[in-house]
Amino acid sequence: MPTHRASGTVASIGYASGPLYFLERGSGPYVASGNPATEAERLTAAITRASAAVAELMAVAEPESAAILEFQIAMLEDDSLAEPAFAAVVRGIDAATAWSAALAEHIAEYESADDSYFRARSADLTDIRDSVLRALSGIKSGRAPAGAVLYGNDITPTQFLAMDWQRGGGIVLKQGSSASHVAMLARSRGVPMLVGVGPIEAANDDLVLLDAEHGRIIVLPDTEAQREFLKASTAHHQLLNLARSQVRRSATTSDGEHVDVFVNIAEPVDVDTIDIATCDGVGLMRTEFLFTRGLPDEETQYRAYRKVLEWAAGKPVTIRTVDAGGDKPVRGYTIDEANPFLGLRGIRLSLSRPDVFRVQVRALLRAAVHGELKVMFPMISLAAEYRAAEVIFREEAVALADAAIPHRMPPLGIMVEVPAVAIDPAPFRDVAFFSIGSNDLTQYVMAAGRDSGAVNTLGDVRHAAVISLIRSVARFGEVNAIPVSLCGDAGGDPAVIPLLIGAGLRALSVAPAQLPLAKAAIARTGTRDSSDAAR
């Protein structure tokens, strides 16, 4: 078989070479008993075994991995998840069919979500489904050899965590998403990963070269391909080692301009593995993690926010109010909508449910005394939305003062992700800061879902229209003394950073694992040359 090449989207930068290993999710045949009582007992036992297996893996997992597995255990222990399956068993359906059908609706709901955090949960639910099915059929998961390049439609968190990535290897997915939990884990551990590659001409155990810097995979490489791969991978590793050795340095362009580099975090446990000396603070703390099991109380939220503020040791922490909506299901909060991507989400939903929003506001006001908190509102379209949210903050501050509860009013800013705001930011002159959400801004400007493989090439932040809007917002902020940062995935992409600096941005927020290469990219960038490139 001759050398075969394929390309895809980089989800985690790096290089790997090794045997190709086809991911399989098959559970094996299931032989039904024909007795509803027996089927119910089998399903109960399978759920228990699956939960125990996840708990065993969680016991030796790192903090960020343990948090993902904790969700799976919580779902397996949630009786409401299995209720439809047991009801079907009573009607005479076998345990395996009943369980698959019960999970299918949940998986589809999460897969359709626009928000990356909730969409990532679909892989967790698929993992839960398959682990129970394997327990029912008595089939154990196959384990890939060390150093293998995993290939399949998608990969579950437990499949990822079962690999010893210290011995090399990588991931190539036919579909997949760069915003999935596994992609985030891959970036945090430096595991090279490509998504959206589609079918490739290869067989199990074929030697492959994975170039997850330029987005390509080479099957059965010839001598020339191996030589080019070695040259590129060596250069990358030399750059990465240098960048890591200098990550505690302040980020400065080649012509001496300082650039603030913050980190994005999904939940408080993320900071346990981040050295605060390597960054300028937190540019985006998501709060959706608090709502995955329903509506959190004030104390739970306060403790989560306080942990991150105290870790930051006086550096700014920007926390985003909950960005849930019709496309991101939260029990007792969200609603079903025909077009959830453009529906009641973000600040729109928060303002429609002040009872829920005020709980979060009180927790944020109380936590503000423990550090330099900044709060931003997602999916802002109108100045009236910002003012309504600000009023609620001020009302709750008065209530806390009357009750003699320590609190502080933080600066309030907005996410710039709705094109209307980027086109005409003038109504927002009184906000404390802007944070550009490049992921949503790009998909709304280009009318291309950011995780749809079919339109993947359209959703490019480097498109002139998107860069033009970013430049316009940066200029408006400079003229009106409003700080402007960017917290989307583009901020950590070395290939995009020169364009962002050229557009006038001097503050970026990136995934923690992207800090070294992001700072290195800034150091290689001259503001004058990048300004020309961004035009």
Image (cartoon, rainbow, N blue to C red):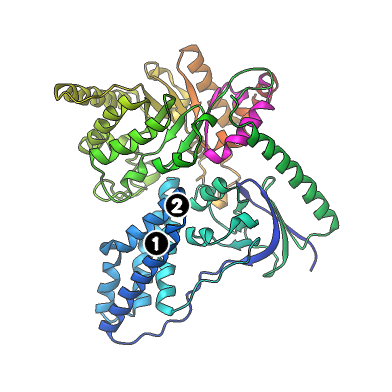
Q: Which residue is mark 2?
A: 120
Question: How far across and down, in percent of the image, does residue 162 sit?
Answer: 52, 62
* Left or right: where 488 falls relative to 533: left
- Could you tell me if residue 319 is visible in this image? no
Circle 1: element type: helix
Alpha carbons under labels 1 and 2: distance apart: 20 Å
Q: Residue furthest front?
A: 60
Q: Which residue is mark 1?
A: 55
Q: Earlier in the sequence, mark 1 or mark 2?
A: 1
Question: How far across and down, in percent of the image, does residue 517 sit?
Answer: 63, 36
Q: Residue at x 34, y 80 (%)?
A: 94
CB within 8 Å, label 1 to label 2: no
Give the amino acid at mark 2: Ala
Work out whether 146 lies above or below 468.
below
Q: Residue at x 33, y 22 (%)?
A: 410
Q: Residue at x 78, y 50 (%)?
A: 230
Give the amino acid at mark 1: Ala
* Left or right: where 462 falls relative to 481: right
- Could you tell me if residue 274 is visible in this image? yes
Q: Which mark is residue 34?
A: none
Q: Residue at x 48, y 58 (%)?
A: 157
Q: Give the mark toward the camera: 1 or 2.
A: 1
Q: Is residue 21 on the magenta stretch?
A: no
State which quadrant residue 144 falls in.
bottom right
Question: How far across and down, in percent of the image, does residue 163 sit?
Answer: 56, 60
